[in-house]
Amino acid sequence: MNISIPIEEEIKQAIAKAIEPYLIAINNRLEELTFNKPGPMLISIDEVSSMLGISRATIYNRINSDNNFPTPKKEGKSTMFKYTDIRDYVDSL
């Protein structure tokens, strides 16, 4: 049984207004990183941290606990993510 709690339109609009600048910033940064770059663009964990507004530790926690969080790629000692995976994750939020 799916139970939903109605949220008043004012609250929905306030939430949308509050997160809109963050979503725009993330989208702009992803476009900036991928402009005119061939192949899958990899971004560092620090860039993901900055875009999502969460710490590196939180990212590692989500890697281990959130099945929807993108799987990183190891490039030497660096932890990298495909930009499309991060973009798709943000879109799913």
Image: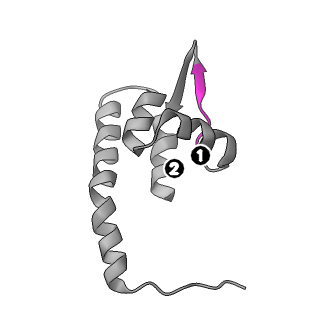
Secondary structure, mark 2, is helix
Q: Residue at x 64, y 85 (%)?
A: 3
In the rendered view, would you say 35 is above or below 10?
Answer: above
Q: Position of residue 80 (x, y in %)?
A: 52, 26
**Residue 72 among those drawn in magenta:** yes
Magenta region: 69-74
Q: Residue at x 30, y 28 (%)?
A: 36
Task: Give the label on residue 69, or none.
Answer: 1
> Of the residues shown, which amino acid type is indicated by label 2?
Tyr
Q: Quadrant of residue 63?
A: top right
Distance from the alpha carbon under mark 2 to that under mark 1: 7 Å
How many numbered badges does the structure rendering display?
2
> Of the residues shown, which amino acid type is indicated by label 1?
Phe
Q: Are marks 2 and 1 in contact (CB under 8 Å)?
A: yes
Q: Nearer the viewer, residue 68 or 41?
A: 68
In the rendered view, would you say 3 is above or below 85?
Answer: below
In the visual, does 1 lie left or right of 55? right
Q: Quadrant of the N terminus?
A: bottom right
Q: Residue at x 51, y 58 (%)?
A: 92
Q: Quadrant of residue 91?
A: bottom left
**Colour mode of the rendering:** one colour
Secondary structure, mark 1, is loop
Q: Nearer the viewer, residue 88 or 2?
A: 2
Q: Position of residue 38 (x, y in %)?
A: 40, 25
Q: Nearer the viewer, residue 88 or 4?
A: 4
Residue bearing mark 2: 89
Res. 57 in view: yes
Q: Residue at x 59, y 31 (%)?
A: 72
